[in-house]
Image: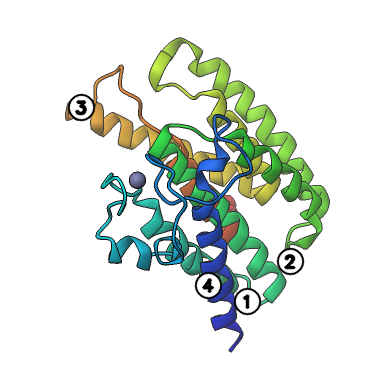
Amino acid sequence: MEIVSVAIIGFACGAAFDLVFDRFYSDQAVTGPLYRCGACKTRATPLLMAPVLGFILHLGRCPDCRERLALRTLVLAPGAAGLFVASYLVFDEELGAGLLGGFFATIFLTLTMTDLERRLLPNRIVYPSILIAAALSWGWPDTSVVEILAGGAVAIAIATVLLLISLPFGANAFGFGDIKMIVLIGFVVGVPPVAVGIFIGTLTAGIVAAFLLVTRLRSRRDYIPHGPFLALGAIVAMFWGQDIWDEYRG
Ligand SMILES: [Zn+2]
């Protein structure tokens, strides 16, 4: 059963990202022993390091300092397993494409968690991911290398325009982290899906931001993360971008 192997690989990928999660931020050392609790950084036991199970068995709190453990521990490994399986099915059970799509979907899920947890889309994830995406541009079944590289170029152009438009809007505007994430989306999904991804990402972000402002759940000065919406747009574009584009073009 190939699909079970894909799910296990995805689970392991998400669990690995969860373990090194703090290392993605530039204020953390890249090397050193693994820890689960960001508050006390006590060297973790194997039981505490176990994905999902470690969180549940310790009731979501660090056994040493009783600080709450990050919710990403519950999300990343099962989420990645689900995304790998979805990718495998979307790419007609082609193993290579399924793993490639699963990997980048997991990158976007991880960026969602960093933006929610720390309001950051770390360079340590985004820059290497852009390089990996460009290097593996030949790996997609229905997208050529030229289409992928053109996607990167289009994304850089759109990101520049978005940045210029949003400069006067302050805190709720697009930041440099969002801009770099858009460039990553371009190099992952290529043309024309990059347009679909950015459209879905910015539209859903705008709708949710407008809802939060109108209902006064957030004020104009509050931070509203764009990363989760861009991640949603990226995953939809990667899986169904070409179909949506064809439908739109009639
Ligand atoms: Zn602790």
According to the picture, the residue beneath numbered tag 1 turns out to be 92
Q: Earlier in the sequence, mark 2 or mark 3?
A: 2
According to the picture, the residue beneath numbered tag 3 turns out to be 214
Name the residue at 59% across, 36% down: 29
156 and 77: which is toward the camera: 77
| Kind of residue at badge 1 | Asp
Mark 2 against mark 4, which lies toward the viewer?
4
Furthest-bottom residue in this view: 1
| Kind of residue at badge 3 | Val
Q: Give coordinates of residue 126: x percent, y percent.
A: 63, 39
Secondary element type, mark 1: loop
Q: Residues within 10 Å of mark 3 (few under 14, many from 20)?
A: few
Marker disc for residue 141: 2
- Separation of residues labelled 2 and 3 (CA atoms): 43 Å
- Contact check, label 1 and label 2, Cβ < 8 Å: yes
Q: Residue 198 vs residue 221: left or right?
A: right
Relative to 37, residue 154 above or below: above
According to the picture, the residue beneath numbered tag 4 turns out to be 85
